[in-house]
Image (cartoon, rainbow, N blue to C red):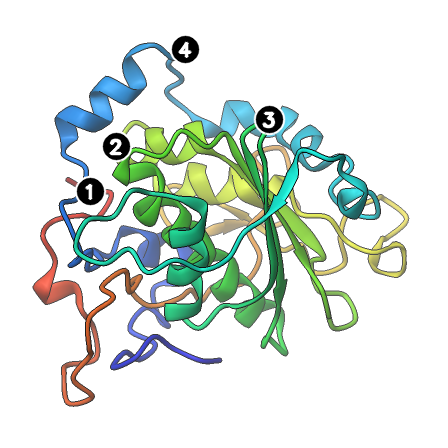
Amino acid sequence: MPRYPGGTAACSDGGDRDCLKAESTIGSGEKGTKGETDERNAGRTRRTALAALGTASVGLTAGCLGTIKQFGGSRVPVDPTDPGDDPEATPGEFYFLLEENDITVADLYHDTDDNDLILFYESDATTATESDDEIAMIYRVFSEGLIDRGSDVNHLYTEVTDPFDGQVEGWAVNAQWAEEHLAGEASDVELWNAIARTKQYGDEAETESGTGANESETATDDGTAADGDTSDGTADGENSTDDTDTNTGETDPNESDSTAGSSNGNGSDE
């Protein structure tokens, strides 16, 4: 699948959980500091494990598929906006950064009543693993390009416009999950499993048990999988994306495979 300019599949052997730990380049403007992250979290109910939230997470995407295009008049189309040197964590910047990281945006809407983002994207994936790569990349852009920069958006809902047979057709992420992940209060495994629980599949991809056909083993804290155990959530595939490219400047094609070395320490493992 496409990679960000100058990058390669640096996380291909580590799986989604390892790749979520990789530092990314912010480059344009000042990143949110740990103090700012703590301040954003101060007024919210604290949770120490995203796994505990997963049982309710499917409710976040209820209505995502099939009815997502029927949202009311509060849904405003979003156009891409270059963050430049002074990013403001706007929906338009999110659109721009997605495309900078090779995610093909079909449509992006801002539901101003609920302060949610609704993303329709065209998938380049041909396998469940590549589909998970795209999900991980979109999450990284949402987390580091919006939430870590001070955005007050509540949720991101997504829909794949052209899924292959058995591919996930939609998923969602709660901004609070991203805040806890950025603050180190939730592990990569907990974050990934919470997202995996929101995955929606088409009718033909449903099994008799009601689970998606491509849902795989549960991710565990040691990076292994527990066969047949779905009580802690599911995580599809083992590969993920490279470091998120939120630097809107020019990229030297001769740079090394990963941008982590030039990071300002913006990864989730501060």
Q: Which residue is mark 2?
A: 184
Kind of residue at badge 4: Thr
Contact? badges 4 and 2 (CB < 8 Å): no
Residue for point 72% across, 57% down? 169
Counting from the top left corner in percent of width and height, residue 250 is at 19, 77
As helix, strand or loop, the secondary structure at mark 2 comes to loop
The reply to whether dot 4 and dot 1 touch (C-beta < 8 Å) is no
In this picture, is 152 found above or below 78?
Answer: above
Using the image, determine if residue 209 lies above or below residue 152: below
Give the labeled residue for mark 4: 45
Sooner in the amino-acid sequence: mark 1 or mark 2:
2
- x and y percent of residue 256 in the render? 15, 81
C-alpha distance separating marks 1 and 2: 6 Å
Kind of residue at badge 2? Gly
Q: Earlier in the sequence, mark 3 or mark 1?
A: 3
Q: Do callouts 4 and 3 mark residues in contact (Cβ within 8 Å)? A: no
> Label 4, label 2: how many angstroms apart (C-alpha)?
15 Å
Q: Secondary structure at mark 1?
A: loop
How far, Cα to Cα, is label 2 from label 3?
A: 27 Å
The residue positioned 37% from the left and 69% from the top of the image is 100
Give the total of numbered labels. 4
What residue appears at the point 28 percent right and 21 percent down from the top-left corner? 40
Q: Is residue 63 left or right of residue 217?
A: right
Q: Which residue is mark 1?
A: 269
Q: Earlier in the sequence, mark 4 or mark 2?
A: 4
The three-letter code of the residue at mark 3 reads Asp
- Distance from Cα at disc 4 to Cα at disc 1: 22 Å
Please rate how many residues cluster around mark 4, counting C-alpha atoms within 10 Å: few if below 14, some from 14 to 19, many from 20: few
